[in-house]
Image: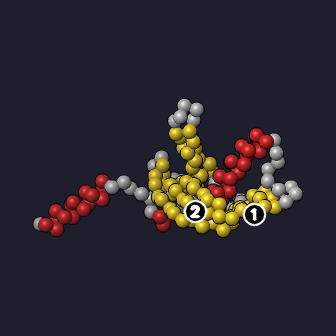
Amino acid sequence: MFRFVALIFLLFLTACGSPTPPTSFAPGGEIVKSAIALSLNLTQEKVTKQLNASDPNLGVSQINVKNIEPIYIGHLPTYHLEGTYNLKIGLPEQEVTQKDNPFDIYIQRQKEGKSWRLVKRETDSEGETQWLTYFIHHGSF
């Protein structure tokens, strides 16, 4: 009888915990690389428009994921990844390499499990937080 009660109690505690996606479904290296590059390109677009400058050529390499936190956003499995990467910036007259740049990104697996989206937390003009998503073009960076 004690085992039965203990089993029911254990199942109850498990059911009450907040579910998290399995880390075994976390994005692979190429998806992470593409997500970092997409995040950089989104930021770069804003800056180049403000400066009326040409887009530099960006190359992401040496990705080191230090932390993976699986969560759900909008009922879809999402992975909050933190770590570092190297960046090569190709400018018209020179090339610059930056090492150990930190990254903090959210990558979301889509319903069918075949595609991924970069998820960015944005604050609108009224101070409300919302999540915006951007399709990750796998292998394009």
Task: Name the side, left or right, on which 68 lies relative to 20.
Answer: right
Residue 17 rendering spot, x and y as whole percentages: 33, 55
Residue 112 rendering spot, x and y as whole percentages: 53, 55
Kindly identify the amino acid type of the residue bearing the numbered disc 2.
Gly
Q: CA distance from mark 1 to mark 2?
A: 17 Å
Q: The residue tagged with tag 1: helix, strand or loop?
A: strand
The C terminus lies in which quarter of the figure? bottom right
Residue 66: in sight, yes or no?
Answer: yes
Residue 132: quadrant of the picture: top right
Q: Point out the tag, 1 or 2, that comes first from the N-terminus.
A: 2
Q: Which residue lies at the image location 64% right of the left edge and 54% below the top edge? A: 136
Task: Name the side, left or right, on which 90 lies relative to 40.
Answer: right
Question: 113 and 42: which one is in front?
Answer: 42
Question: 70 and 116: which one is in front?
Answer: 70
Q: Which residue lies at the image location 55% right of the left edge and 45% below the top edge? A: 121
Kindly identify the amino acid type of the residue bearing the numbered disc 1.
Thr
Residue 30 rendering spot, x and y as whole percentages: 64, 64
The circle on residue 83 is 2
The circle on residue 41 is none
Q: Which residue lies at the image location 85% right of the left edge and 60% below the top edge? A: 94
Q: Residues within 10 Å of mark 2 (few under 14, many from 20)?
A: some
Q: The residue tagged with tag 2: helix, strand or loop?
A: strand
Task: Name the side, left or right, on which 94 lies relative to 20.
Answer: right
Residue 44 rendering spot, x and y as whole percentages: 72, 48
Q: Which residue is mark 1?
A: 97
Q: Which residue lies at the image location 68% right of the left edge and 48% below the top edge? A: 42
